[in-house]
Amino acid sequence: LLEQVAHPGRADAPEIMFGIADLLVGRNEPGDYAEASRLYDQILLRNPPEYLKARTLVGKAELLIGNPPEFNNAISLCEKARKLLDKDVSEFFASKTFAVESELRLSRREKGDWAEALELINDLVKEKKAHWYFRGRALLAKAEIILYRDPDDLSSALKLVDFSIKELASRPEDYFSLKDKIIKAEILSRRGFKPDFPRAEKLLTEVLKARSAYKDLIARAKLDLADIAAHPKAAKLLKEVHEMEGLDPYLA
């Protein structure tokens, strides 16, 4: 595929580049996100059709979720993409603009961001025609909001995360499928019934054994497990997290 896009005269070169970028994001090996971002930039320079431009804009926005200085730009990219896609939440990439922007706003946390993020999330959760993958992500985000903003309503959070797990069941190694297990474990640990702790430990252990190595999820799972595990296992887990480099500030 890379050889094919080396010929700039190809009419389908932007489509091929988008496909490569999508594969790179899914593979998630070192350097893949940077290469995907470079390809997205190349597509936008070629003045692609509106549908491909919109998909590229939201793809680029998603890569910026972990980059706080770029949050404003990324949210703007989502808004531009949604205008091009007519807010049809049954369409994969239109749904993606809602999910990605809500995740960006939850991370940015400026005044009004949480309320706007919740509105975007509810648009996906309430709409039965919303694409299942991004509806699953939205259910997960809403469960996490309840967990940390309204911890007296843990039963609702648990229902939401279970719905999310069901939506994403066909992608067990996906980032958000693994995050589902972490959020469910955190809800169970917070609720604190006697059977909750072994259930939480089982979920967190499954994340650590997964083939998909997402560093932030591994660190979060180890910290959550350390919180409920006995010494010396807890100390060992904490030491392992302290030795990890490049963690998000909230994990550090």
Image (tube, grey):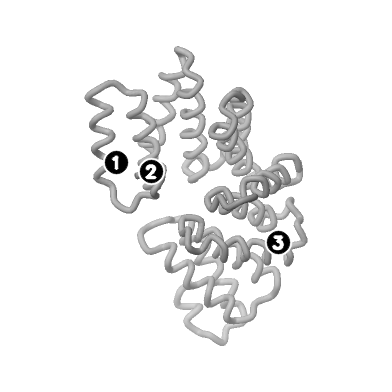
The amino acid type found where label 1 is placed reads: Val
Residue at x-position 66% and y-position 67%: 54
* Label 3 to label 2: alpha-carbon separation: 32 Å
Residue at x-position 48% and y-position 63%: 69
Q: Is residue 99 left or right of residue 248?
A: right
Residue 241's disc is 1
Element marked by disc 3: helix
Pointer 1 or 3: first along the chain: 3
10 Å neighbourhood of mark 2: few (<14), some, or many (≥20)?
Answer: few
Nearer to me, 118 or 177: 118
Residue 1's disc is none
* Horizontal and vertical percent position of residue 92: 67, 54
Q: Is residue 230 left or right of residue 180?
A: left
Nearer to me, 246 or 97: 246
10 Å neighbourhood of mark 3: few (<14), some, or many (≥20)?
Answer: many
Residue 251's disc is 2
Q: Is residue 11 left or right of residue 70?
A: right
The amino acid type found where label 2 is placed reads: Leu
Q: Do tag 3 and tag 2 residues touch (Cβ < 8 Å)?
A: no
Which residue reaches farthest bottom?
Answer: 9
Q: Do tag 2 and tag 1 residues touch (Cβ < 8 Å)?
A: yes
Q: Is residue 40 above or below residue 200?
A: below
Residue 82's disc is 3
Q: Is residue 44 above or below residue 110?
A: below
